[in-house]
Image (cartoon, grey):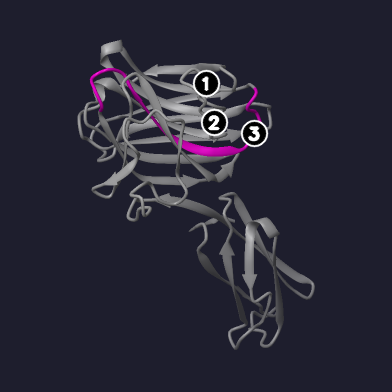
Amino acid sequence: MQPVQAQIGSELVLRVRLANASGAALLGRTVDWSVAAQDGTVFPASSNTDLNGEATTTFTLSEPIAVKVVSAAAGAASTELVTHGVYREDFSTMNPDGGWPGGWVQAGDYAAFPPDITGGRGRLRCRTDNTCRMWLPRIHERDLRVQATFRIANPEVVGLGINVRYDGAFPSQTDKGTGLGLFSENVVVAESQYLRFWSGASPNNEDWVAAAPMFQFEPNVPYRMEFGVHQNTTGATHLAGSVRRADGDGGTDVLAHEYQGPLEGVSGGIGISVYQEGGGTMAVEVDDILVTP
């Protein structure tokens, strides 16, 4: 059964139909609904079929975005309805202090200015020769796919990253916490133009586990990055990354790797990272963040 996507915290009306062997609707039969506690809630927990043989309930998705299963039972008959949560952030709202909405917090203290929202997009401005990062602890998953759109004022001195399985720690520039990451580097001044996977395990242990050459970003053009991780039964984590122009004009650079290391089977939050190398303070704008299983 293909899972139905819905925003976490939203409500879905679920419907089943009871019929006899001839296909005729069964009226007034009780259907009992159930869902695992961590997956969400259903109301009502029991409902009766109508003239069409249909019974409904409302399912409210809980915070995790993992696949959720709602069971419907009527006597000896039962079925399952499959859905999963989706997290979206379009920066249409902001915190009272002007910062990023929805529970995003700054990891570390390496931004030249506080993260804010401008023109309906999140904005990060790092100190020179530093990485700054935003962390979303409310998403705490092992297997997921994260997409985000970036615009860079001066891409020749800036790198971008998406973090998963991230613990939120950032004690120093040599210890950026524990997690996995996809980074696109267009730092021309350092002759570094690569799409790379990063793994970090505190304290002070980071590694670049795979790399592929990539195209040069253009100033103030939206680019879409995607990073997915999936734990395999073979004891490795499949990493898949890509970057492309958001308007579809041009090709797509892709990278894949089978990761084996200390982050096997680990769950964590997600992060958005920006690296600034020289050139003063450059703004990076972030928009249309989408997280799915």
Q: Residues within 10 Å of mark 2 (few under 14, many from 20)?
A: some
State the residue at coordinates (51%, 28%): 170
Q: Is residue 157 magenta?
A: no
State the residue at coordinates (58%, 35%): 230
State the residue at coordinates (57%, 34%): 167
In this rendering, position of residue 68 left or right of residue 111: right
Dot 2 corresponds to which residue? Answer: 169
Residue 266, numbered label: 3
Extreme-right residue of the structure: 76
The relative height of residue 123 versus residue 182 in the rendered view (above or below) is below
The relative height of residue 114 versus residue 112 in the rendered view (above or below) is below
Point out the image quarter for the N terminus.
bottom right
Q: Earlier in the sequence, mark 2 or mark 3?
A: 2
Q: Position of residue 90 (x, y in %)?
A: 35, 51
| Tag 3 secondary structure | loop
| Kind of residue at disc 2 | Ala
Q: Which residues are magenta?
A: 262-281
Alpha carbon separation for disc pair 1 and 3: 19 Å
Alpha carbon separation for disc pair 1 and 2: 8 Å
